[in-house]
Image (tube, rainbow, N blue to C red):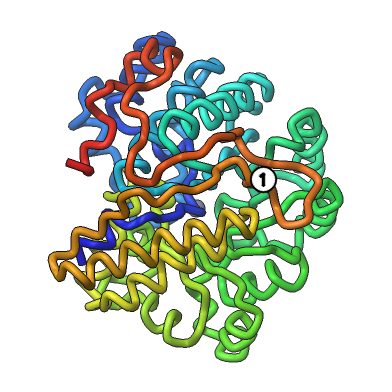
Amino acid sequence: MSWILSAPKAELHVHLEGTLEPEMLLGLAARNHVSLPYTTTDEVRAAFRFDTLPDFLEVYWAGLRVLRTSQDFYDLTYAYLVRARQDNVLHAEPCISPQGHTQRGIAFDAVMEGVLSALADGCRALGMTGGVILGLQRHRSEEDAFAVLEHSKPYRDKILGLGLGGPERDHPPTMFARVFAAARDLGWRTVAHAGEEGPASYVAEAVDVLGVDRVDHGVRCEEDPALVRRLAERQIPLTVCPLSNVTLKVFPRMESHNLRRLLHAGLRVTMNSDDPPYFGGYVNGNYTAAAAALGLTPDELFAIARNGFLAAFIHDELRASYLQALAAARQAALNSRVGSGGTPGVSVDAGRVERDGGPQAGVGGCRRRISLSSAGAEPTERAARSGFVQPTNLLSSFS
Ligand SMILES: [Zn+2]
């Protein structure tokens, strides 16, 4: 088990707003003079109690009020990258939902400047690759979604793709068919939340009507065996988030999660954290909890991590490098039988992160050779200035 924790990984389903740790929530509230109903991190954590997606979203959206400036979005994004890198996430495709901020009066450009700058700086400093996905909120109108697309045009070459999140029930993917077609015309990849709170038919709609490249969650596809077979045949990835699913009662307990069954049905299942502080774990926390409850074997863990790189929106050459590094980690663990999973000396050309055949790089600019065994240990000047990222936070899991 322990080898997978230090093995190279990709994270494809995480909401930047959902990585807002209680400490940063309070810190930003103080910095921006935003009054909150809590004054200690314990009180914040106590507020992170919910059983359903709508209840969760109410707490989640209330916390967003502390995010006001470009620097706030920079700090949030940079802190996520640092934390993900501690789990040896080497490629990340986090999502930001601009509508949750523009409707509060925050400028679209402030959100994007902060997120994109942090992705560029963080990837460079930490030896990672990655890009941002713009997440639409499905309870808002199609007109509003088109406005997001219009605002994003100056950044189109720096954005990986379009996503769809928010409360699923009564908001079927079909409502956004024309928006997703327009996103594809921009050259973007597309993903959508479906089959978490909503039924299997929403997964089918996401695939058939929106034409998504990946389904976020998608676990309720199991209710339709024909759909499961189709997803397996087409190898459409599911970005599964086990701790999120159990917290929001998609499954009553981790032991009943269907991740293992879906994997054995031939689906391209990946492991992700969704909104880590709210659901109790980052990527490695999800691996640990799912492996313990479901008895996942080293081969199954390897398959899931491999699927992450197979499903990532990266150039084939970079994909091959990451897959090679992952295979080396597995082999090292097999050789040592102590599960250290180290990959000394394996290097990846992180400059080639453009999409297959696409004209836009779509990624936050990591154009240099990196070593998978050595990331930078100092935050950028802008990150250090914020006070939220300390040098000692980096690489603590690599000792
Ligand atoms: Zn999500």
Q: Position of residue 344 (x, y in %)?
A: 30, 50
Taking the image as drawn, is residue 216 in sight?
Answer: no
Count of numbered tags: 1
Q: Which residue is mark 1?
A: 160
Q: Nearer the viewer, residue 94 or 345?
A: 345
In the depicted structure, whether residue 379 falls above or below residue 256: above
Q: Quadrant of the N terminus?
A: bottom left
Q: Residue at x 78, y 47 (%)?
A: 142
Dot 1 beta carbon under 8 Å from ligand 1: no
Q: Quadrant of the C terminus?
A: top left
Q: Is residue 237 left or right of residue 334?
A: right
Quadrant housing residue 295: bottom left
Q: Secondary structure at mark 1?
A: strand
Q: Position of residue 178 (x, y in %)?
A: 84, 55
Q: Nearer the viewer, residue 399 or 89?
A: 399
Q: Is residue 74 left or right of residue 364?
A: left
Q: Residue at x 61, y 33 (%)?
A: 365
Q: Nearer the viewer, residue 258 or 312?
A: 312
